[in-house]
Image (cartoon, rainbow, N blue to C red):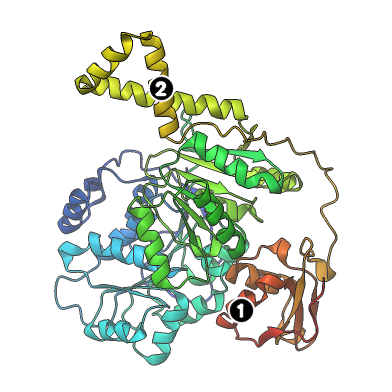
Amino acid sequence: MHVCVSSAAPPGTRARGDHEPIAIRMMTAIDDMTTFADLNLRPELQQALVSLGYEEPTPIQQQAIPPLLQARDLMGQAATGTGKTAAFALPLLQRLSPDDRGSAPMALVLVPTRELAMQVSEAIHRYGQGLGARVVPVYGGQPIGRQLRVLQRGVDVVVATPGRALDHIARRTLRLEAVEVVVLDEADEMLDMGFADDIESILGDTPATRQTVLFSATMPPRIDGLARKYLHEPVRIQITRDTSPEGEPSLTHQRAYVVARQHKPAALGRLLDIEMPEAALIFCRTRTEVDELTETMNGRGYRAEALHGAMNQEQRDRVMGRLRAGAAELLVATDVAARGLDVEHLTHVVNYDVPSAPKSYVHRIGRVGRAGREGIAITLAEPRERRMLATIERVTKQPIAIERLPTVAELGAHRLERTRASLEAHLLEGDLEHYRSVVESLARDVDVMDVALAAVKLAHEASGSATDPTEEEIPEPPRVPAKGQGGKGRQGATHPPGGQTTRLFIGRGRTAGIRPKDLVGAITSESDLSGRDVGAIEIADRFSLVEVPAAAADGVIAALRRTRIKGKKATVRRDKAATRE
């Protein structure tokens, strides 16, 4: 864990004009703070924490709360699940006046997705119940009329996605003149989703004297640029959850298996049989792959649910409700659909494909290993993806052990061991007298050992653990050369690997400052495609042409029409006569 702060003293009156480069120095960690009582929070907040069962602050809470209580700006690098919501919510609630608080919000929290908006809003509401905190989530996909009525009644804290926040600002139903605190939660995700201009517009409508708090799982240059422009001499904190104290193992165990694509469903089923996850989140690249894999896993006897961008909010809520209630054990999802999800009993994350960027890998595996609980991160890599796996290992500085898939014999032995453990548990529980007469009558004619063997066989088969005699070994994939990662499309984009493609017309081009990475970033952030799925890109003065898989074209068009490219809406449609094999 690293803690850095600006060398300047805590600010008094805070101007938001020209900013000097942010000076950074190391600060000793506050090692003697072990309870929330040491943080000098209001009694109402202390009581809320006690009632919720919180015993001691997490590292991010321990390091972030004191400077935030001093009204310092803060820039924190912390993964999901480290306790950052409480880290910014408790100081925010500390500011609430005990008197009439008016109708305009005192704080605005910006988040990338509606799921995260609901989760953060619920958390702040729980922490602030004793203070009568008025908290409202504001996001797309919910009738705006309901949000208008709540905002008109008066709120203290608004938790919003950037797009819906701008809608309310334009309607003058969200007034920011009284905002004292702005929190940018999961800032890197918001920038990846194309919200940079929205965020800057919103910050421009808030008072110059506000306190600004930024949290991000990763710190790309764009985040640092945003901080330099809008944060005033911020305290900088880095909490690396995967770095354990010396002598202690990491809470998230990471490993990978190299397997050919056609054998991935069988490999996944075999690993799940061995791992027996309480709940697992399986990431796929596309909606089609999500649907196909969900159907396959249900056919193998698992309780799997799909989650992707084609589902409406009611469907998403129903799926998440089934997972949280234990009615489903596998959630198969795309990256976009899984943003902001927080499932407390999640034990495993599976990358059905190697993520296209190290940052995506960090976000994915951050779903497990939370709150002191161990988690497992498994990646199924095709031979051609080994280089990307090595890149992720190098960039994240985290070891990813490449292991051999269990054989049919090892799987059978594991299933037998599970049956043995189940029988042992029944023996320890006792209450078996009801069955004694059956055993005694059989023992008069056959050996007791044979009776026991028959009972074990019945128990093993009844549990569904018997090995399928037709189950075949999964062959070891051939090694691919280090070079030869496929041809390149124009402008440096990679052609989609085989199959039919469609060319899309996008009504923004070189004169609007459009670059290939802007188009690839918009497509991968708003749809289920990865960078390698995007084909040739041509950029003219006033328009651009981009190749995408034909099966995904309609989804990409719909997604791009809902978002902004370089801050503006663009015409998006299929290019005429652009489909080819």
Q: For residue 449, what is the image quadrant?
A: top left
Dot 1 surroundings within 10 Å: few (below 14), some, or many (20 or more)?
many
Residue at left offset 45%, top offset 61%: 340
Residue at left offset 66%, top offset 62%: 530
Residue at left offset 76%, top offset 84%: 575
Q: Nearer the viewer, residue 455 or 131?
A: 455
Is the C terminus in the top left, top right, bottom left or bottom right quadrant? bottom right
Label 1 SS: helix
Which residue is denoted by mark 2 in the rendering? Answer: 456
Q: Is residue 429 left or right of residue 188?
A: left
Residue type pointed to by label 2:
Val
- Residue at the farthest bottom position: 171
Q: Nearer the viewer, residue 105 or 541?
A: 541
Which residue is denoted by mark 1 in the rendering? Answer: 560
Residue at mark 1 to residue at mark 2: CA–CA distance: 58 Å
Where residue 563 appears, x then y in whole percent? Answer: 57, 79
Dot 2 surroundings within 10 Å: few (below 14), some, or many (20 or more)?
some
- Foreground label between 1 and 2: 2
Q: Is residue 383 left or right of residue 22?
A: right
Say whether residue 397 is visible.
no
Q: Is residue 67 above or below residue 113?
A: above
Q: For residue 142, what is the image quadrant?
A: bottom left
